[in-house]
Every structure is written in structure tokens, then in C-alpha cells.
Amino acid sequence: MQERWAVLTVAVAGLALVIGFIGEKFFGLPPSVALGFYLLSYVAGGYDVAREALPALFRGKFDIDLLMIAAAAGAAVLGEWAEGAFLLFLFSLGHAGEHYALDRARNAVGSLGKLMPRTAFVKRGDRLEEVPVEQLAVDEIVVVKPGERVPVDGMITAGESSVDQSAITGESVPVMRKPGEEVFAGTINQDNALDVRMTRLARDNTLARVMQLVVEAQEQKSPTQRFTETFARRFVPAVLIGTLLVIVLLPLLFHWTWSASFYRGMVLLVAASPCALAIGTPAAVLAGIAQAARRGVLIKGGIHLENLGRVNTVALDKTGTLTTGHFAVTKVIGFDGTPDEEVLRIAAAVEEQSSHPLAKAIVTTAHERKVKFPSATAIENLAGKGIQARVENADVLVGALRAFAGDPAAGEGQPLAGTISQLEAEGQTTVIVRHAEKFIGVIALADEPRTLAGEVMRRLRAQGIERLVMLTGDNASVARRVAEKIGITDVRAELLPGDKLKVIRELQHDRGVIAMIGDGVNDAPALAAASVGVAMGVGGTAVALETADVVLMGDDLGKLPFAIGLSRASQRIIRQNLVIALGVIAMLLIASGFGVIPLSVAVVLHEGSTIVVVLNALRLLAWREHTA
């Protein structure tokens, strides 16, 4: 009940209103019983509104919540219980919709914190002690075992190992780290034990800074929020003061009776109550969010729906967003007449025993091509270089070029080195295969762009997106290769999380409304700082999903143009609803001021405008993207 309190109160308010109204009008329900249902609707519909409005009033803050309560109270004084209950029901419905999913955003920092190990093994004399990371001091030596997360930022003093830094840097492959090189807290040590000299306290490490950046970015208020607050501060007191003046001055200046002046004041209050104004935007937002959800896009609130419609620049992470996030074999090159299938067969026999992403890609490709390979024996892992074994009674070594240092055929100026240089210049990762002391071929791999990535970029440009920017922690050659394939010309590579955040802020300063699309922890500060943060769903880390304002479920990048188009349609509907609501309020204020309409007509016109804006908003449920 606590988790669904808002939904429960709105449902009770609506049900009690319907029973009271229909029962009294069509089934002869006694007025006293109907009044009981109206009172229940008042309590249920007004509870959350009053809980926020009344404390704010005591602090001297006037908002639309307070005006809605005053309007409902005025309707009750005049005996228009159904009108007051309807006002509160509609407003509470919009209120609940606007606050949907806000609590989830508060878990972003907690999700980041889950990546940080709570304890670390520290060398103290001849012993290893397990110590909470908060108690560690700079320059202490921490031992990181294979398969464990690095608990601190520090410098390696002993050991070599591959480290998966994707959570921090966004690099698509694990990188080799050796003594004298830096590692980050939250990254994963893959192969061998490392001795790491701590260089920063736990509260100052890279992951902690990412968490702080998220907090700071989330505290920034949007222009829409500031406009709404300013409008409410001026509009609500003006209406309340105007109503009070009508009630007090008419008897004093024109000898009206107090009952007549009170009636005129209540007509004014009901006429000025911004029900259509208050529900027009939430109704459009709820309809837009519902339509987005039908198509696999989660939008976490109205402010994000509106902001997404104003986006003119889109920044995109590479790994896992524009690309699949998984390596695939792109080329198999056989030397001296060796068939491609033979190169793949020998390599797969050795790599079958490895858990490295490149090894998995080679074995998967062999299976897909129905290449049968034997089992390897005497397998030995060469940390950061490759893997060697015996296949069919011959020695085989599969690995990077550095694994063959000392072999004349792998030296500079040789055909092998030239082939490797050409492939790597194209942004591809290479695996060399040597069988029985003879180089038989090279396998090239890459994290390939998503199938529809180029089409998505075309659709975004067709929607008027002025600039597409790739942000990645990967190296520049790999980034440029992917960018050329999908049609992006602005590439920013080799970026840490803080660098991505800096680029987003620069783009905001130069370009205005920015959308950032990403999937990793390294994207979290940029997602939070962007005007709209968009996360890839299935592949997105928990923190990216919590920090983002929009989530593309199913990792479907093709939903991004749909979401932007829907948001722009929602913006148009919201503007139309504002014109309708403000126009009716202005008309009713003028008419009530001259006394040409009774309360019943004011109620009908007032609620009529509410129905019009709701029906206008519901048009979004039928919205479809028009693609050329």
C-alpha cells in the first residue's frame, strides 16, 4: 500500500465520485449518502495535494496545489460537492502521474556504490589483512586477486594482468596493465594477481568522483521547473487576493449582501481555478509516456518528455550503444595459401579453453561457419599476450603481435607486421596464429556497429537534429572507423567519465538542449548532466538506467528517433492545451467579473475545457512516426 499509495488514493477518489454522482442523478441515492461519497472523494483526492500545499503555505509559499484546495473548498461552501470532488480527482491524477518514478532516480548513487568493493586485502608485513576500504591509507599495498574488482585507485607495483576497465573508461576490450601503470577502483582484474599501491583515499577515487558528479548534475533545475515555480508564485496569490477583494469590497462599496458577494467570489475562484491548466500538461505527458511504453521506450516524467522534444544535438556513447558491445570476426587472412577455414580451425581449437572476449568471438565464428576443430592440450596462458597449446601434435601460439617478439618473421618490415599495421589502422583488433613454427594467418575482430545505426543517424538528421557527436573512452582509430560506417563526423575519443561530462557541458553552452545516449557507468555523469539522458535498456548498467531520464528497452537504438518525434508531438499538444486552458480562464474571469454567468455555467465551461484538453492529449495515444 505504501508503494502504491498515490494510485490507491486516486482510484478511491474517482470511484467515490462516480458512485456519488451517478447514484444521486440516476438511481435515487439519498443526498446525505451521496454527500458521504463526495466527502470520501474529497479526502482521497485532496490528501496528497494538501500534504504538500499546507506545509508550503506555512512557509509562505503559494502554489497551484493551494489554489486547487481553495477552489474545492469554495465549491463545497456553495454546495457544489461534485464539482469540488471532480477538481480534486483530476488534479490528484495529474499529480500522481508527474511524480511517477521519482524515487528510482534517488537510487542512482546507491547503484554506483555497489561497484565498489567494501574490503581489500592489504600487505602488512608478511601477512595479508582484510580491511574496510574506508580505513586504507595512501601508499598502502593492496593485493587484487584474479576475477576480483579493484578496490582502490592506485599504481601497480608487481604483476601483469588484463583489466576490464569498461565500467570506467568505456574501452571495448580489457587492457594490459603492468607495473607503473594506473588502475581504477571498480574495474575487474582478469588474469593474474596484482600488487597495487593506493594513490587516492576511497572518498577521492575515480568511482567516488563519478558518484559526486551524478549528484551535482541531478541537482540542476530545468528551465521548465523554474518557469512553473515563477508562474505559481505570481498566479496563485493574485487569484486568492482577487477572490478576497470581491467578497469584502462588493458589500462595502456597492451595498451587496455578504451572501451575494461570497457567491460572486466563489464563482471567481472556480473560474480562475486552473484545473484545465493543471491537467492539460500532465494529461499530455501521461498519454505520451503511455504511447512510448507501448513502443518500448520508458520516459521517466513529463519534464524529460518535454526536454527531449527540444533537443537539437545528440551525443552518443560508442561501445554498447552505437555498437553491439560484443566482438565479432571481421576478416580471416591465411598466409602462403593457407585456407581461411584452416586458420579458424587451429585458432578455435586453442581459444576454446579461454574466457577472453576475443577468444569467445573466434570460437563462436567457427561454430557459425560449421568449422570442426580438435581439442587442444598442454594449454598455457601468456598473460596479456595470448595462449599457447598443442594441437594435433604441433605447437600452436595464438595471440597479439607482442607474443611473437624475437621471431624474425614478426619483425618490422616483414609482411606479417605490415598486415597487422594495416588492420589496426582500420580500427580492428588482431589475433595472429602460428602453427608448427609457421605463421599461417591473422584473424581480425571488431566491435561492429549495430545493424540499424546508420539508418538511425539518417532519421535523426531528417528530424532536424543539427549535430551528432560520438563520445567514447576507446582509442581514436577504432572510434573513427565506427563513425565513418554510420555517418558521424564529430568524434571525441579516449575520454574518461569526467571528460565526457565536460564535453556535454561545453555542448550545452554552445548548442542548448543536449541528449546523451549511453549504457555504462562511465556514461552516468554525462547522462545526468545532459538535458535528457537516454540509456540503452537490456545492456545498460543499473546506474545508467537509474540516472537516465529515458530508457530504450530491448537495446533498440531505432526507438530514439521515435522517442524524439513523440516528444515533439507532445510539446505541440502541451502548447495547445495551455492556450485552451488560459483562454477559458481569461474568458471566465471576465464574464464572472461582469456577473454575466452563474456558477453552474462557470462549472460547465470550466470542466468542458478540462475535457477538451484531456481529449486533445489522448490524441498522442495514436501517434506514429512518419518515416520517409
Image: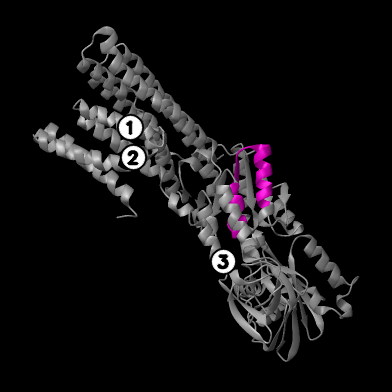
Q: Which residues are magenta?
A: 500-529
Precedes in sequence: disc 1 or disc 3: 1
x, y percent for residue 17 = 21, 38
Label 2 near label 1: C-beta < 8 Å?
yes
**Regarding mark 1 in the picture, which secondary structure is present there?**
helix
Q: Residue furthest top?
A: 254
Name the kind of residue labelled 1 in the image: Met
**Quarter residue 66 falls in:** top left
Q: Main secondary structure of the magenta part?
A: helix
591 to 444, vertically: above or below: above
Pick the residue in front: 104 or 140. 140
| Distance between the alpha carbons at the discs numbered 1 and 3 | 45 Å
- How many C-alpha atoms fall within 10 Å of the one at disc 1: few (<14), some, or many (≥20)? many
372 to 483, vertically: above or below: below
Precedes in sequence: disc 2 or disc 3: 2
| Distance between the alpha carbons at the discs numbered 1 and 2 | 8 Å
**Quarter residue 48 falls in:** top left
x, y percent for residue 457 = 63, 46
Residue at (27, 22) in percent of width and height: 266
Q: Residue furthest right?
A: 413
Name the kind of residue labelled 2 in the image: Val
Residue indicated by mark 2: 49
334 to 595, vertically: above or below: below
Evaluate whether residue 576 shows in this view: no
Residue indicated by mark 1: 68
Left or right: 410 with respect to 556? right
**Position of the N terminus by quadrant:** bottom left
Mark 1 against mark 3, which lies toward the viewer? Answer: 1
Evaluate whether residue 107 shows in this view: yes
Name the kind of residue labelled 3 in the image: Leu
Residue indicated by mark 3: 115
**Quarter residue 380 falls in:** bottom right
